[in-house]
Amino acid sequence: MRFCLILPMLLLLLIGIVGSQGCSPVAAWERGNLAKKEMALDPNPKLNHLRDHIFTSREASQGGASGAGGGCGCN
Amino acid sequence: MLIKWLFKLLTLLLMMGSARAYALHEGQTAPQCPSALTDKGQQLNLTAYKGKVVLIDFWATWCGPCQKSMPFLNGLRNEHLQEGFEIIAINVDENTEEAREFLKAHPVDYPVAFNPKGECPGIFNVEAMPSSFFIDKTGKVRKIHLGYRDGDQTEIREVISALLAE
């Protein structure tokens, strides 16, 4: 009897957790704020690319950000 | 007991999976959009354009492809104006002033309406920005075009020519 109750309750809990997440679709015409530059994952892509390049060249032996260049920053 | 629980589960599932009740499709009559206000503050009246081929263009200043499409649409409109073609642009910026500033810098010849609260794109079920709804002379939606790319110009021209020839 107890098992009969626990299983549906667990199922209900699981479905509740999955189904009641705070996600709602943003309509296509409501994306004005999301389209702003400061909302981008990387708001300064060019600057960060340059910094990545310098970091990779200097710290290549550390790994983690690929391994290009030999330390001169020229490659 | 188990059946009761299963019934409750099913009810919950049905409550969570509510679907969109309204969606505009090709072949349906174009809905009215009174919440969109024209530049003069009047309600947009689409029935006034019956007998003309109309392209309703939903756009916003934050949408790059929308901005890109505007010079092309303006040229297309002026090219076919005498044949009974008109473009109605509906701006969906939350801040209408931004759109007005944009239009001052990049003026267009076709009428522009403003709907900052977004009721109108909701009625039309706009799925992408920009969205163009091609409406024939009888007031029916004949084609829905989503987005704007350079290669789309030929297709848009062909649709307009075909609708004008009817």
Image: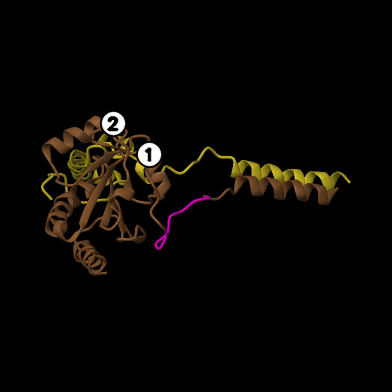
| Left-right relation of A57 to A65 | left
**From the viewer's perspective, is residue A69 above or below residue B25?**
above
Q: Chain of mark 1?
A: B
Using a 10 Å C-alpha cutoff, classify the residue at mark 2 as few (fewer than 14 neighbours), some (14 to 19) or many (20 or more): some
Q: Secondary structure at mark 2?
A: loop
Residue B106 is tagged as none
* Mark closest to the chain's N terminus, 2 or 1: 2
Give the residue drawn at x 28%, y 36%.
A36
The residue wearing badge 2 is B95
Let me know if residue A69 appears in the view. Answer: no
Q: Which segment did they paint magenta?
A: B21-28
Give the residue drawn at x 26%, y 55%.
B54
Q: Are marks 2 and 1 in contact (CB under 8 Å)?
A: no
Let me know if residue B18 appears in the view. Answer: yes
Amino acid bearing label 1: Gly
Instruction: Looking at the picture, tell me which residue is in the foreground, B85 or A7.
Output: B85
The residue wearing badge 1 is B118
Query: Where is residue A9, by image quadrant?
Result: top right
Amino acid bearing label 2: Asn
Instruction: Looking at the picture, tell me which residue is in the foreground, A74 or A15.
Output: A15
Chain corresponding to brown in the figure: B
Instruction: Looking at the picture, tell me which residue is in the foreground, B160 or B116.
Output: B160
| Left-right relation of A1 to A28 | right
Q: Are marks 2 and 1 on the same chain?
A: yes
**From the viewer's perspective, is residue B20 above or below residue A51?**
below
Question: Magenta span: helix, strand or loop, mainly?
Answer: loop
Task: Pinpoint residue B83: horizontal percent, then vertical percent.
Answer: 17, 61
Q: CA distance from mark 2 to mark 1?
A: 11 Å
Task: Pinpoint residue B44: horizontal percent, then vertical percent.
Answer: 31, 41
Task: Pinpoint residue B94: horizontal percent, then vertical percent.
Answer: 32, 33
State how many labels appear: 2
